[in-house]
Amino acid sequence: MLEKSSPTPQNLGGGGGASRTAPPPSARAHCLLGGASAVDVSHGNQSSPGGPGSATAAATILRRAGALNRPPQGRCGPETASCRLSPRVTPDTAGYEKDVTFWIILMGSMSPDVPLLNDYKQDFLLKRFPQTVLGGLRLKLGYCAPPYIYVNQIVLFLMPWALGGTGTLLYQLDILRDYWAASLSGGLMVITASVIQLTSVYAKSKSVVVKRMITRDILAEEDEHEFTSCAGAETVKFLIPGKKYVANTVFHSVLAGLVCGLGTWYLLPNRVTLLYGSLGATAALFVFGWITLCIGEYSLIVNTATETATFQTQDTYEITPLLRPLYIFFFVSVDLAHRFMVNTPALEQMNQILHVLFVLLPFLWALGTLPPPDALFFWAMEQVLEFGLGGSSMSTHLRLLVMFILSAVTPVVSYFIPSTIGVVLFMTGLGFLLSLNLSDMTLAFRHGVARHRVGNSSEAFPGNSGHQFRRKECLLCVTVLGVALLEAGLLHHYTSSAHVSRSSSQSVVGYVLMALLSVLWILRETQSIYIFGIFRNPFYPKDVQAVSVFFEKQSRLLKIGVLRWILLTVVAPLAMVAFLALDSSLHVLHSVSVSIGFTRAFRTVWQNTENALLETVVVSAVHMVSHTDSWWNRSFDTGIRLLLIGILRDRVPQFITKLQFAMTVLLASWAEKKQHRKTTTTLCVLNTVFAPFVLVIVVFSTLLSSPLLPLFTLPVFLVGFPRPVQSWPGAVGTTACVCADTVFYQQMVPRLTAALQTAMAAGSLGLLLPGSHYLGRFEDRLIWIMVLEHGYPYCCINVKGLELQETSCHAAEAQRVDEVFESAFQLEHPQICSLNEHLGNVLTPCTALPVKLYSDARSVLSGIIDSHENLKEFKEDLVKVLVWVLIQYCSKRPSTQENNHKTENNREASGVVLPALNTSPCLRSLGDSDSLNSDTLHDWSDDSIFDDEPSIKNRREKVQFKDLPSTSLPIPGSVDSQSADDYSTNTGPKNDLYRTVLLGFPAVDKGHQENLACIPLVELSCSQSHLLRLPEEWRSNCIPYSRIMEASPLFPEDWYQFVLRQLECFHSEEKSSVLEEIAKDKGLKTLYVHTVMACYIGLFGIDDMVPSPGQIVRVYNGGLPCSGTLDWLLEKPELFQLVRKAFRYTLKLMVDKASLGPIEDFKELTSYLQEYERDWYIGLVSEEQWKEAILEEKPCLFSLGYESTMGVYTARVLVLQELLVHIGKLNAEAVRGQWANLSWELLYATNDDEERYSIQAHPLLLRNLTVQAADPPLGYPIFSSKPLPIHLC
């Protein structure tokens, strides 16, 4: 579905008359192309390889998973569907606009009933799913196989039941005790599994070629095999793929024996009968329970099934076979605990329930509800760390593991502290320390040691101050910790007195906390543009168009934000510490509940103050309104109550957001015309009829804190498996589809982080919780922000940059994002407390942040670069700019070069002799007196530049020029005067190589050469002229001296003297007199005339011919015409770079003159050139210096390009300025749900079709953007940052 891309925010056009002084960079950049017929082409960037880059990586993984169709493109449509619209149309672009409109109408009318799966994928999934249900048993192959293939699989599948049944029979006959029967079954299973694995190893060792059957079916070409016998090597390898590692072969065989033995013990009929007292229930549980065990065993030792619950993209260490035995062990462990703790009613009831769920395990495995071992491990640690120990989700797996261990030690140590006041102080202090960013503490320690070693030097603290534990933060933490310890100790000692009423004191503090919660909530809501995401905030600035005006009005809100920060960071934690220290439960020692509950409570106070405040207020309010002898107050102490309320506090908002997500998917599929499919009505009716069942799914997903998975993003909801908050297994920020546009996000992130610091501290982004997602929008850039962890007083985020290429789906959703932000921030006269027009969208606007970044604008140079007058002036200006560039270069050379001529300063005059022909290092056979007049320009034909593929030719020329060596190169067919000794060095082969590159140069008549570069002795009349003298290696060239003298009238002598008099390289009192003497030095002028005109002739010759636009663009790109001057320049890299810089400055000057008016005098021209040198980078987007200039934050950048689709030359201007970035909060459950579906659809269903339904544009769910923001290889962000700590103080 193709939608019109978002309108261009800014145009480059702008009128302008004559200008007396050079305008500032930003003004000049945005008035760049006034007059003529300049047309704005696009505001977005060219196509980035983000999508294809990710597709290449994903294709390998998906093919290994079984995908056989074409590799994924990672986008919703073909490249031809990517288009950008211009708000201004000229006759040159009218046809282009009509074509775009046609494609919009055509694609917009496409039916939304694109297939969920193509025909091959449907057959593939119908084969794979039964294998998943049966644990890898392949009963549906899709082709005709011998019967023994199926018989062998069934025998291997039922083998554990036969072995376990043997032990069960011996136990039922009272021949063996239950544990001996289980041991016998387990031992037999170990032997059987070992035999199976050894058989697989033996079959692999035999060199048997599996023959493929010749067929036209793609599926048959991949899967059909010719089996020669029942026990042949090819049959064994097909049935038993085997293990990759020997260790896993042994480990899985032993594990299979344990599963069989414990499973036999678990399903003994007498034992099951004791639980239920029914023979029918026993028989059903025994039969279906052994089917569950057989499924688990088959997946472990025979053929591992592809699990729907896939977390890792590749199973490197063969963890997937452990998934099913892991859950079997869990069920058996509960039964074993019940065996040894008989008189525990709760354990008996749990065992009864789990025996029933045991037979349902195959369905839970098939639906992907149960997580794989790696995801389960990290998810369980996060849940225990947050709700049991008071911590937070961490930004990396290593930090999570370290923090979990440290936090788990805390309640254990507190349990053994003999003093109550010691317990209180220990919990308060350690809870505070663990809530800090331990990485910053370590960094502060290292810098402290380094600073001590270097003697308090500032060099001990390198790097970005945002990543350091800064001095003011240290002071804040030390002060708050000291006050908290003092307060907790005194209050606990105070409540130890018998005459003090603890409950009354705690109630008073409870009232204070209620007031604090109300004030903080009000202050937080005033910082965002919407209250509750529904009503517009009347206190928020109404005019957000201008950055200065917006910043001035928002500064008032920031003052309120400072008050909120003080209350939240200092007052609220200390008040909650007082509330906890006054609790009577802390006077009871050696209580497990007290150690766990209060360790968590004292930690949460600092780790997540806002949530802790809400939990404390709820506990205090319930205690006040409930009776003292109520079940709630009698059964739990304050710490456990806070723990239970904390779980409710997390799950209730999660349930609400999941319900909102489900309703959005359901209603959008019905109300949105483009989302309406043929099956929509049926699905809506089924969701309505089975609404209670859907609600149960939402509740179950909420209890597990797992994503609500909409299958194919349709209103078909499943419970996804629980996974960590990050949703992806890899380390944050390690992978991205890097392209040319990545540099924009690299420059933006430090500035954006600083702006986010202020907004987060003020509360503009709402409640900061790990797993929260935010979306930023500026021009064509989309910034995806995810909160990874939160502590005191910091949070850690990950910033992703989405591709700038506006494909059809990307443009449609980006346009909806713009509409959401425009309705919130850009209304001219917003009503007070008006409603959010996009309430059903997953994006809710929060605030606008002033960030210093680059605005990107492009224009067509029609009427400028092809103007005869402009091109004629270009040649005149080029000589002036060359003079200015060379003089500036010589005046700024290092002082070491000055010292080389110190002895010559005492002489009244110094002679300079330019080398003759026989000493020139350039090509001896080039430089004919007639060739430079016209042959050079003939090499530049307009036909070459207006060809269909000019960029390809430019690249070919650039490669040739770059590879040329700095030595003289002989021409084929000419006599090479190089000595034979030269070939003994490494230069010989190199010259031979490049001799082949230069094939095709025209032969030159050596008998018709003039004396090259031989001029009379030149004397420098001023003793200071050597400071501006050109380097000696520049004074020789291949241009005939007579031709230089012929072109010397073009040298602007008055401009030359003006530039010399404006130099700032002399600081003496007699500066003006010295510069006057240098300006009158004819010898120095002769040197400049010779060098400048040699460069000029090499570019254009001396004919009065106006260069063509094609010639201008090719020289701008570095493709100089083939001549002796080219080789002379290439031998002098510094001079070559200066000539190219002067040429580019001249082009920029031509564009500025066409936009802003003619230049009146030399002073104005100097200001232009000085500004180019100081504030601009003028080059090519493809150059590495372009990226370096962006990262160094050069104020302005300019580039010249060629738009092949329109056949016009374009200019691109980047201007660094402070602009507003709109930030909105996304529904976190909508993101997790769509990412869960993406993982299932690509890793299990291998649905890598670039036109699949689940990647099409969805204006409410932002489906395409969400898929882009996923970690590679499933997603394709072009930038992903490392975890970025943001200090909220």
Image (cartoon, rainbow, N blue to C red):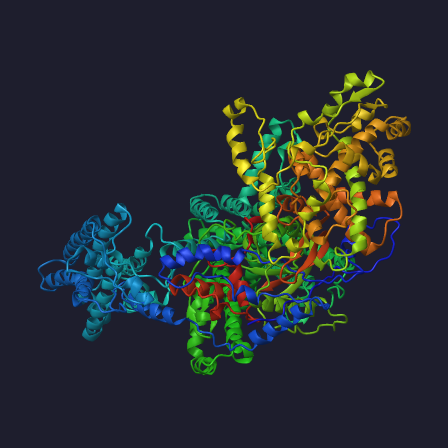
Front residue (pair 189, 900)? 900
Front residue (pair 799, 412)? 799
In the rendered view, tell whether residue 875 sits above or below residue 857. above
Number of marks in picture:
0
Q: Position of residue 488 (x, y in %)?
A: 57, 47
In the rendered view, tell whether residue 1069 sits above or below residue 324. above
Q: Is residue 694 left or right of residue 752?
A: left
Does residue 288 show up?
A: yes
Does residue 349 show up?
A: no
Image quadrant occupied by the N terminus: bottom right
Which picture quadrant has residue 949? bottom right
Q: Position of residue 1087 (x, y in %)?
A: 79, 30
Q: Position of residue 697 (x, y in %)?
A: 42, 72
Front residue (pair 61, 777)? 61
Q: What is the residue that sits farthest to the front in this orientation?
A: 1007
In the rendered view, tell whether residue 639 sits above or below residue 284. above
Q: Position of residue 620 (x, y in %)?
A: 56, 62
Q: Is residue 525 left or right of residue 604?
A: right
Which picture quadrant has residue 764? bottom right
